[in-house]
């Protein structure tokens, strides 16, 4: 064997070792894949997803599907082969980790943030639907999360409406934070709250955490509704991106007839109490998920139009949504005529 041949074989061996090592080295990226879709108008284990008390409910045919994305968790390692697989998958995407997660974000903190966002989004979706119906909705401060292991656990519950804390009337979330910060760690604090229309007072003793007294609740905006409406989404689904679809599902449940004309409709987008639709992440993957689930129409938030690219939507129509009211009008037009002219992302293209 010549010296040149031996050198070539050695180089190949070294290259193989380098590639083998690279295959297991974690890289600072996350992958996005289409996740499952959930029909908010459907039953789950024999129970309606949208439940109404104090108002007539109409459970008609049709589907309103929220869409989800499988995204790498903050603490998951992504290797080169996984990145290449996602890169060459037309329905997947690769993003730098720094554009998705904070440097110190963990799986637990990410899950809790998503859970808080989902609770807030559910209530805001109900507010948007009732506002669309002309109902009066009053803002309140409610509990969006209770941290396990901290003093409030077992005494305060998610969606409790906070009325007073340590004698301070609560009008915004910061009032709660300031009242607890002003308390002495180890001394009980009175929380006056409303739970299921019952006013009650509970005492919680703050504990010092990171140098400050804390009880372990996350206060945030909530609403007083003229009747009770809940949207029960599985606990493993979080984030605010289903706001538009939840608001449409609530509206459909509170009004006679099928908003979708019995068809399968999907979409995404955050929602405000006044019905404005906001952008979300993973738009291409959510379109692909809806396409694969058999949806015939998909609502794209207007601010996501620039990100849909050349996504394959199959036979599914894409309609631009700027407000909930606009989405309702688009649905009515589409139900009356499947070939109706609807707002599209092309309308806003320069």
Image (spheres, grey):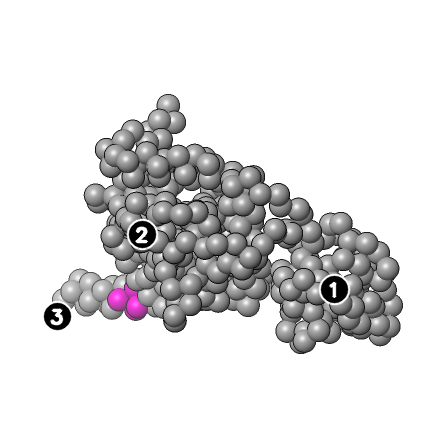
Q: Earlier in the sequence, mark 1 or mark 3?
A: 3
SS class of the residue under badge 3?
Answer: loop
Residue 156 visible, this orientation = yes
Q: Earlier in the sequence, mark 3 or mark 2?
A: 3
Q: Which residue is mark 1?
A: 199
Check residue 80 in the rendering and tell me which mark sits there, or answer none.
Answer: none
Which quadrant of the structure image shows residue 112?
A: bottom right
Q: Which residues are magenta?
A: 16-20
- Which residue occupies the extreme top position in the image? 350
What residue sits 21% from the left and 45% below the top? 314
Depth check: give the residue in front, 309 or 7. 309
Percent x, y for residue 215? 74, 68
Percent x, y for residue 149? 67, 76
Q: Residues within 10 Å of mark 3 (few under 14, many from 20)?
A: few
Quarter of the picture holding the N terminus: bottom left
SS class of the residue under badge 2?
Answer: loop
Q: Which residue is mark 3?
A: 1
- Does 47 appear above or below 97? below
Disc 1 to disc 2, C-alpha distance? 39 Å
Compared across the picture, whether 144 is left or right of 299 comes to: right
Disc 3 to disc 2, C-alpha distance? 74 Å
- Does 34 appear above or below 297? below
Q: Which residue is mark 2?
A: 62
């Amino acid at each position: 064997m010549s010296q040149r041949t031996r050198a070539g074989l050695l180089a190949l061996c070294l290259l193989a070792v380098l590639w083998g090592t690279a295959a297991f080295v974690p890289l600072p990226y996350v992958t996005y894949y289409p996740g499952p879709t959930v029909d908010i108008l459907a039953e789950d284990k024999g129970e309606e997803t949208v439940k109404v008390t104090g108002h007539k409910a109409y459970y008609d045919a049709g589907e309103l599907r929220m869409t989800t994305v499988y995204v790498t968790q903050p603490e998951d390692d992504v290797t080169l082969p996984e990145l290449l697989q996602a890169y060459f998958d037309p329905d997947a995407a690769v993003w730098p980790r720094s554009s998705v997660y904070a440097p110190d974000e963990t799986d637990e903190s990410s899950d809790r943030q998503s859970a808080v966002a989902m609770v807030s989004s559910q209530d805001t979706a109900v507010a948007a639907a009732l506002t669309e119906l002309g109902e009066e909705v009053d803002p309140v401060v409610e509990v969006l999360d209770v941290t396990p292991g901290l003093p409030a656990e077992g005494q305060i519950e998610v969606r409790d409406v906070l009325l007073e804390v340590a004698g301070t009337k609560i009008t915004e979330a910061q009032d709660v934070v300031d009242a607890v910060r002003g308390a002495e760690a180890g001394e009980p604090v009175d929380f006056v709250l409303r739970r299921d229309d019952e006013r009650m007072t509970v005492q919680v003793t703050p504990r010092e955490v990171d140098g400050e007294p804390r009880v372990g609740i996350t206060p945030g905006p909530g609403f007083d509704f003229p009747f009770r409406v809940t949207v029960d989404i599985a606990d493993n689904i979080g984030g605010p991106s289903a706001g538009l679809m939840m608001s449409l599902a609530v509206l459909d449940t509170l009004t006679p007839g099928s908003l979708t004309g019995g068809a399968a409709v999907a979409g995404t987008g955050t929602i405000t109490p006044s019905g404005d639709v906001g952008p979300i992440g993973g738009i291409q993957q959510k379109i692909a998920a809806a396409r694969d689930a058999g949806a015939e129409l998909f609502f794209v938030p207007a601010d996501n139009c620039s990100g849909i690219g050349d996504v394959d939507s199959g036979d599914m129509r894409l309609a631009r949504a700027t407000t909930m009211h606009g989405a309702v009008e688009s649905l009515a037009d589409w139900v009356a005529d499947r070939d109706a002219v609807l707002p599209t992302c092309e309308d806003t293209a320069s």
